[in-house]
Image (cartoon, rainbow, N blue to C red):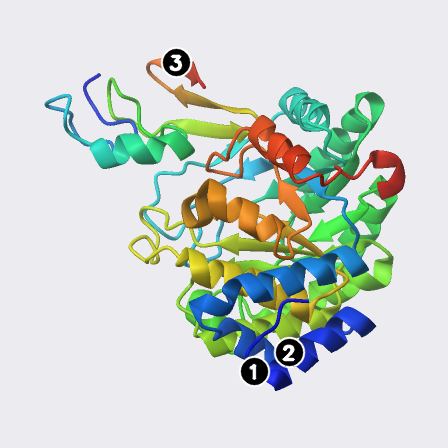
Amino acid sequence: MTYCDRCGTPLSSETEHAACRATRELEPPRFCPVCRRRMKVQVLPTGWRAVCVEHGERTG
Amino acid sequence: MSSLSDPTLAAAAARVLETGAGLAEPDVLAVLRLPDEELPAVLEIAHQVRMRWCGPEVEVEGIVSVKTGGCPEDCHFCSQSGVFASPVRAVWLDIPALVESARQTAATGATEFCIVAAVRGPDERLMAQMRAGVAAIRETVDINIAASLGMLSQEQVDELVAMGIHRYNHNLETARSFFPQVVSTHTWDERFSTLRMVRDSGMEVCCGGILGLGESVGQRAEFAVQLAALAPDEVPLNFLNPRPGTPLGDAAVVDARDALRAIAAFRLALPRTILRYAGGREITLGDLGTRDGLLGGVNAVIVGNYLTTLGRSPDQDLALLDELKMPVKALSSAL
């Protein structure tokens, strides 16, 4: 992973973005972790679907 | 009944239990100002009021956003406003995904499925999506369908009734006196006029708001009483979940004890209303607080995810209701 999928800033070590990781337990991703583009995200009752125009769909 | 140290407030709460008529604003404010040591007592009273006037059943609902983001309004708490630098992008849900969302919701035992759109009010494209979506859900899923599409015209109200929408959500969000601090693109009274049309149409009225927007405790009491005057069928109670990029992105989360005081106060102001846990409860109250609220006046929950954020697993909430011996309201009794 190159970018934080919550805030979109670069990840340079595994210890960074602990707050974002914790928050992500109750949030879907918003940024593509590969290219940091904002993704189109649909939250569904029991999951989510996020699409990056360049890197495709992620689900959770 | 557990006792409150203030005999006037204790008598007022006893009258709510006896008559089913809500507390007046000064008493609601007194509840909101109770010291921590009296919180268990007021939650117990609120629970008794709920059991007496609403019963033990809990109404379970799922929600989904049919049109996310890109909203022209500037509600300062909302990540879906196109006015702010929020990471939420505009996206529409297609009909198959809408039907699947309803199916997933019904599978939890929920009786309510609310279709929500981030708009000032619906345009023809959204109404067409609603017509197609509601019809498709009705073909395959046995569930009550509610809607939340912003401010409506009378024609749109009539059309939603014709579609079979049984309940319409339109939150007043906060006290009338505080609303201009939260939204500048429309007024509290504009929202109220939609609610009046919804009420007159025969649809059930769902109207609540968000606590923690910066309102004073007095304005929370004002809001509870203003909701009571509307006499909504349901009040969804949200707690601010500060969203990145919004004007309230750095606001503090409501203290859990204040949230529980508010639950008790709103129940005592609205003894016969469906009082629903909505967004923000996870970060405000956690697991223990969720339980306390269900034993303090709340009698409905949104299960699963919210519109742009995630919730607890439905199984967790349903297990908690089972543990508390609170039966989930069945569809037959909801109709």
Q: Residue at the location (56% across, 82% down)?
A: B6
Residue B70: x, y in percent?
46, 44
Residue B7: x, y in percent?
61, 84
- Numbered circle sitting on residue B219: none
Considering only vertical position in the picture, is B33 above or below B36? Answer: below
Q: Quarter of the image holding residue B209?
A: bottom right
Q: Disc 1, disc 2: CB below 8 Å?
A: yes
Considering only vertical position in the picture, is A50 above or below B270? Answer: above
Where disc 2 sits, the SS reads helix
Q: In the image, A38: left or right of B177?
A: left
Q: Determine the residue located farthest toward the left in the rendered image.
A: A12
| Chain containing mark 1 | B
- Numbered circle sitting on residue B6: 1
Considering only vertical position in the picture, is B7 above or below A13? Answer: below
Can you say which quadrant of the picture contains the C terminus of chain A? top left
Where disc 3 sits, the SS reads strand
| Chain containing mark 3 | A
Q: Determine the residue located farthest toward the top in the rendered image.
A: A56
Residue matched to label 3: A56
Q: Nearer the viewer, residue A32 or A60?
A: A60
Q: Amino acid at mark 2?
A: Ala
Residue matched to label 2: B10
Can you say which quadrant of the picture contains the N terminus of chain A? top left
Q: Label 1, label 3: how many angstroms apart (C-alpha)?
A: 61 Å
Q: Label 1, label 2: how many angstroms apart (C-alpha)?
A: 6 Å
Using a 10 Å C-alpha cutoff, classify the residue at mark 2 as few (fewer than 14 neighbours), some (14 to 19) or many (20 or more): some
Q: Mark 2 vs mark 3: tell me if same chain.
A: no
